[in-house]
Image (cartoon, rainbow, N blue to C red):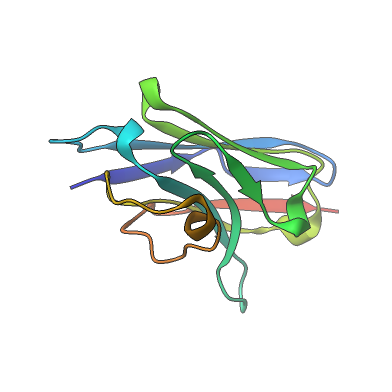
Amino acid sequence: QVQLVESGGGSVQAGGSLRLSCTASGYTYSTYSDTYCMGWFRQAPGKEREGVARIYVDFRTSVADSVKGRFTISKDNAKNTLYLQMNSLKPEDTAMYYCATERPRSVLTWSSCQSHYEFNYWGQGTQVTVSS
């Protein structure tokens, strides 16, 4: 069973930066690099969960328009870790942030990955609070 553990959340002032990490474990018959689609999501109080960024098996990435130019998603297969670098943070970025991965070797096209929500594995969430 794959498990995801997030870290790196916290409180910052507007304009500041944070880097979130999501470390995966529990791979038995496959490897982290076999995962076709991973992503970061966020949910603010009273709002629906929204996709922030996604990364494909070949390192192609996409980010939501609301964070374009400020957030970057990346991964390190050797460390089984997914990252979200967040710069120029705004108060509206305040939310609980979750990482998610698909089941290893579960094949998705890049097009499908960019709109994928039904991930098999989710982290517990890490809070990001941005003050003005």
**Residue name at image x 69 percent, y 56 percent:** 64
The answer to whether 118 appears left or right of 75 in the picture is: left
The answer to whether 42 appears left or right of 93 in the picture is: left
**Residue name at image x 52 percent, y 43 percent:** 55
Compare residues 5 and 31 and report the one nearer the observer: 31
Q: Is residue 43 above or below residue 110?
A: below
The image quadrant that residue 15 belongs to is top right
Q: Is residue 117 above or below residue 98?
A: below
Compare residues 56 and 121 and report the one nearer the observer: 56
Query: Does residue 97 appear in the picture of this structure?
Result: no
Spot occupied by residue 73 in the image (x, y as percentages of width and height)? 60, 39
The image quadrant that residue 88 belongs to is top right
Spot occupied by residue 103 in the image (x, y as percentages of width and height)? 28, 50
**Residue name at image x 53 percent, y 51 percent:** 40
Compare residues 77 and 94 and report the one nearer the observer: 77
**Residue name at image x 77 percent, y 58 percent:** 66
The answer to whether 102 appears left or right of 110 in the picture is: left
Spot occupied by residue 94 in the image (x, y as percentages of width and height)? 69, 58
The image quadrant that residue 77 belongs to is top left
